[in-house]
Amino acid sequence: MLLIFVSKTNSVSHQLDKKTLAVLEKEYDSLHQNALKEKTPKHFSFNPNFISSYKGYELGMSLKEIELLHNFRSSKKWINSTKDFQRVTGVSDSLLSAISPYFKFPKWVSQSQKQIKSKLQKQSKLDLNLATSEQLQKVYGVGPKLSERIIRYREKFKGGFADIVELKGVYGLSQEVIENISKTFKIDRPRPIQRVNLNTASQEDFVKIPFIDYELAYNIVEMRTLKEVYSSIKELTKLKDFPVEKLDIISLYLYIN
């Protein structure tokens, strides 16, 4: 009987080499990726007015774009917004979206922009005391009926509205719609109001105030007698049947020494 022995050393060795090679390749890829990450420039917040040539190159700007920026700054002008940066340099939308999140402007820039925006909004508002029915109906939530009610309420007073809060006296106007109106309208020349002292006014004085009838006026004086003095106009809300939702309007006519 002939026995033949076959060595498997080479086969096992070959298989081990493949496994080892796979592990080494995986480790190499991992090290390579980490190396690339370390080489990738890290961007921190910066003021785009002070981008150097090297910084611009690092950000991906072309030589022409960097030159346009430097020429603009050499004329002692400042970039105060992302839109300004693109207008001056002409960078593409894609590059702008990639680098603009790192822009950091001084606090005074954002504050001045808010002030300008607020000023423009005020200047663009229409006078509520001159508003027509058609103009009022352009406000979301105001239809023909509500616009006519607003005008009728305004015409009850010589000189129109004294304050935007008087819209709370118009039947059917919700607080949300009032806020919508205040975004479009303002009061250029408010109606003058003769205010009375809550702690000295008579019952007859109180009756002249909108939403205060004789019974409520009597109760106001009665409570004042018991308390000796009101310390706040809000104390009136403790009175029975006081129209709390109209407090802002009533407060226009009162003051406390």
Image (spheres, helix red, strand yellow):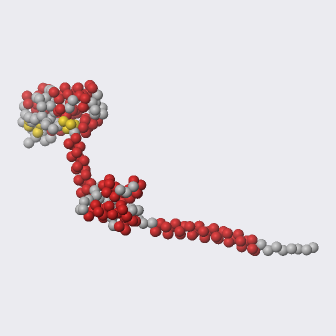
Which residue does the image show at 35% across and 56% down from the upper left?
A: 90
Quadrant hosting residue 146: top left
What quarter of the picture does the N terminus occupy? Answer: bottom right
Is 92 positioned to the left or the right of 173 in the image?
A: right
Is 252 positioned to the left or the right of 4 in the image?
A: left
Which residue does the image show at 8% across and 28% down from the upper left?
A: 204
**Residue 112 sits above or below residue 229 on the image:** below
Quadrant hosting residue 244: top left
Which residue does the image show at 73% across and 71% down from the upper left?
A: 12
Front position in the image: 202 or 13: 13
Q: Is residue 33 visible?
A: yes
Residue 215 place in picture, x, y as percent? 14, 26
What quarter of the picture does the C terminus occupy? Answer: top left
Is 138 positioned to the left or the right of 1 in the image?
A: left
Quadrant hosting residue 196: top left
**Residue 1 sits above or below residue 92 on the image:** below
Q: Residue furthest right?
A: 1
Residue 129 place in picture, x, y as percent? 17, 33
